Image: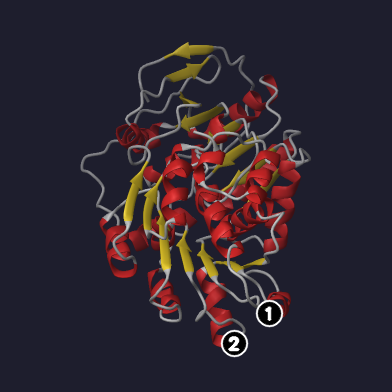
Amino acid sequence: MSFDSLGLKAELLRAVGEQGYTRPTPIQEKAIPAMLAGRDLMASAQTGTGKTAAFTLPLLQKLSDQTGPRKLRALILTPTRELAAQVHENLRAYGRHLNLKSLEVFGGVNINPQMDKLRRGIDVLIATPGRLIDHIERGTVRLDGIEMLILDEADRMLDMGFRPAIDRILKHVPKKRQTLLFSATFSKEISALAHQFLKDPLRIETAPPNSTVEAIAQKAIRVDQNRKRELLSWMIGSENWRQVLVFTRTKHGANRLAKQLETDGLSAAAIHGNKSQGARTKALAGFKQGKVRVLVATDIAARGLDIDQLPHVVNYEIPNVPEDYVHRIGRTGRAGRDGLAVSLVSGAEHYQFEDIRKLVKVAIPTESLDGYEPTEQPARNPQPPKKQGRSQRSNHNSGARSSRSRNESGGHRGRGRSRSSRAA
């Protein structure tokens, strides 16, 4: 199937071609015609498979087909600033040949320029829930003309505790509208959200829940916690990795690791929730431009970072919530390109990584490296951890309640030859 067969107008097909795409992905094949037909959608797809285009292309077409004065007709809600910026970037790229205006609004930046642009008039608003409520309370935005509502990464919004904010926002949106819900999983909470706000939705799933993209090569390396930094620096240098996204569990850990990598002679920057929006934007821009070789991030960046042809992702610390592993490594292997995801697994993280193996149902090869052989034994796990509620997951994702990693220390550099080992 080609994009020509999806019923898109010439201006959109031209923009798609300029982006270098010729064939739609499975989620695009199924979602675009359904959205153009006016159906409510409940859709799930692997990260990096063109989900954003699956809703922005038909949204742009439907808005451009209508005439009349400019007014806010479409609202896209996202959980994070980075995802809002990414969606807006895609929207502008695909709508470059159309006379439509869009705006992204999120916290951490001055609200006055946003207010000014809202007064001038826009067609599409991309917003995080908190900042949108700020505008509603100030009377700087009206949602009574919304015809299309998209909840992007709905499961992440629930994880971050945004359900009350979503309920509050939707009280200002007309009941007669088209609603699309995109989520990595269809949990009970997501199903309840869909039941409340969607009308007879078409359910689209293009891959098993929590599956990983085949283009991503995955492997794990067993190593002691206090030698992870040394091993990471050695791998980046010896393998000549020029662009590496590294995940830690905590904000403090991200800052510390970035500083240590700088000491090792690697250009590095940290990005997390405590950073100002200006600092986050600068770090991400430097990473995309190649000025920053290593970007160290917490899970706030696991969804929303769209970095073209990112080759390497490293789980410096194993996530507390197994599902976050899928979103972390989904930053590489995007749009069918190859990628490598490496997980550094200490003895204390043995059972956390085993939970990830069970979740993704993929054989992840495990090895140890000469000079970095682990001495730590797998931590005892006498009883399964208590099941986390979504509010607890939110705290884990942000690093608020996760335990701090042990202090990393330097040491001699091993040769790093691979040696197969039993599973971590």
Q: Position of residue 364 (x, y in %)?
A: 40, 24
In the foreground, 278 or 85: 85
- For residue 156, which quarter of the picture? bottom left
- Residue corresponding to mark 2: 138
Spatial separation of the CA atoms under disc 1 and disc 2 = 9 Å
- Residue corresponding to mark 1: 115
Q: In percent of the image, x 45 and y 54: which residue is there?
A: 397
Q: Position of residue 380 (x, y in %)?
A: 28, 36
Q: Position of residue 12 (x, y in %)?
A: 63, 49
In the foreground, 35 or 367: 35
Picture layout, residue 297 above or below residue 373: below
In the foreground, 353 or 47: 47
Q: Which mark is residue 282?
A: none
Q: In percent of the image, x 36 and y 33: which residue is there?
A: 350
10 Å neighbourhood of mark 2: few (<14), some, or many (≥20)? few
**Residue 135 visible, this orientation:** yes
Mark 1: secondary structure: helix
Quadrant of the frame with the C terminus: top left
Query: Mark 1 near mark 2, Cβ–Cβ under 8 Å?
Result: yes
Q: Is residue 164 left or right of residue 409?
A: left
Mark 2: secondary structure: helix
Picture layout, residue 341 above or below residue 108: above
Q: Amino acid at mark 1?
A: Met
